[in-house]
Amino acid sequence: MFGGTNLAALATGRVARIVAGAVALGFVATACTQAPASQTASDRNGATVVRVIDGDTIVADLSGAETTIRLLNIDTPETKHPDKPVQCLGVEAADYTKSLLAPGDRIELAYDVQRLDPYGRTLAGVYKDGSLVNADIAAAGLGVAVLFQPNERFYPEVLAAEQRAQESSEGLYSAAIDCTIPARAVAAIAGMEAVEDTVPANAEAVGSALAVVTAAIVAGKAKSAALRGLDTAGNVVDAAIWSARKATYAPQLAASLDRATAIEKKLAAKKTALARAKKEADAKAKAVAKAAAEAKAKAKAEATRKANAAAAAERRAAAQREAAASRRAAERRRQSIPKQTYRAPAPKPKPKVSSNPYPGYTGPRCYAPGGQTWKPC
């Protein structure tokens, strides 16, 4: 409960608790054979329970006056702190104290060096039916042993009770209660251990697995950091529980983180390899597609060339056919014209050749040799 001491005293209490833990076993051992000083009844004052405020604070009727009693050497989770939320098992601790100390119950108060805390509350060990309620609360796992120097009278018995709760995983030491430090540590470990140590074959599955393991690592690191932060967080109860369980859970957290990180590296390497293979396959496919496109274009060009050549040849053939047809048509036209019989032209009458080459000449004739021709002589 808040206000049991100042912050400096709390820090001192945490350190002293670790030191006192080593000697507490001696008090536990002697408790089996003789009653410790805190259980002697000679210095106790009788009182009557009025009400329970929280796990480690009650109001009692002491000599006719209602007095607030802060139980010594025990600290329970907060339920009434003005600046803090209700802490894990704080309500349960208050309910447990109420189950031990009902209004009207007769109790005995035993004191230590200091009678009052800075808030004016009476500091005491509370006994009911001979049992130290301070230790009973610790034995139920609902509070931790603390030293508020110089008051250490009830610390050994409360610490021994807390150690029994720790050994049996009661209350604040139970991993089965979600809000406890052990449960938080177990959840952090389980979250990282749940990551499957397998590397899928395809990129999509690898990406999904990598996202899962990365998220688990981020969550595991955050939870581990939160647990480590309890060493200096100023929460006495949580710091005490973590201090008691750190040797167990810290190595497990580290091992789980290492495992998950190794899996993450394998998945990341696989993702890189698949990406590289895909890039190479894409490049190869692109080259094949380019070659195919070029071949297709070449084939198309060749087909076009052949088609053009064939068309030209066809045009030439058509022209030749057309010319031949024209010739045949002309020939047919020619042959269709009726043939005319040739008639030789009528011979022109030959002019009569006068035997006298010199017409009108009647004079003497001089004949050439042979007597065929002549001329006037």
Image (cartoon, rainbow, N blue to C red):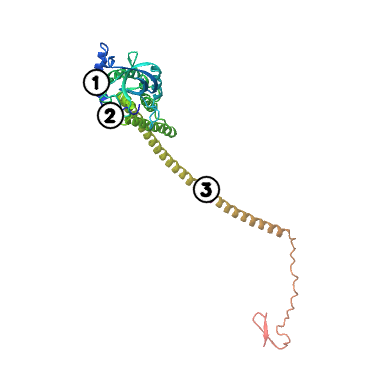
Say if the magenta span includes residue 304: yes
What residue does disc 2 label?
A: 9
Secondary structure state at the residue bearing disc 1: helix
Instruction: Locate residue 197, reporting x and y percent.
Output: 38, 27
What residue does disc 1 label?
A: 22
Residue shown at 48%/45% (left/top)?
293
Label 3, label 1: how many angstroms apart (C-alpha)? 94 Å
The answer to the question of whether label 3 and label 1 lie on touching residues, with beta carbons closer than 8 A, is no
| Badge nearest the viewer, 3 or 2 | 2
Disc 2 marks which amino acid?
Answer: Ala
Secondary structure state at the residue bearing disc 3: helix
Label 3, label 2: how many angstroms apart (C-alpha)? 94 Å
Quadrant showing the C terminus: bottom right
Segment colored magenta:
300-305
Give the residue furthest to the top.
33
Instruction: Locate residue 34, reporting x and y percent.
Output: 25, 11
Label 1, label 2: how many angstroms apart (C-alpha)? 20 Å
- Name which quarter of the figure residue 274 lies in: top left
| Badge nearest the viewer, 1 or 2 | 2
- Name which quarter of the figure residue 42 lies in: top left
- Name which quarter of the figure residue 71 lies in: top left
Q: How crowded is mark 2: few (under 14 residues within 10 Å), some or many (20 or more)?
A: some
Comparing 362 with 222, the one in front is: 222
In the picture provided, is 377 more to the left or to the right than 268? right
Say if the magenta span includes residue 85: no
Query: Which of the labelled discs sits on residue 300, or is there none?
Result: 3
Q: In this view, does 30 lie above or below 120?
A: above
Instruction: Locate residue 189, reporting x and y percent.
Output: 36, 26
Comparing 224 with 233, the one in front is: 233
Q: Residues within 10 Å of mark 3 (few under 14, many from 20)?
A: few
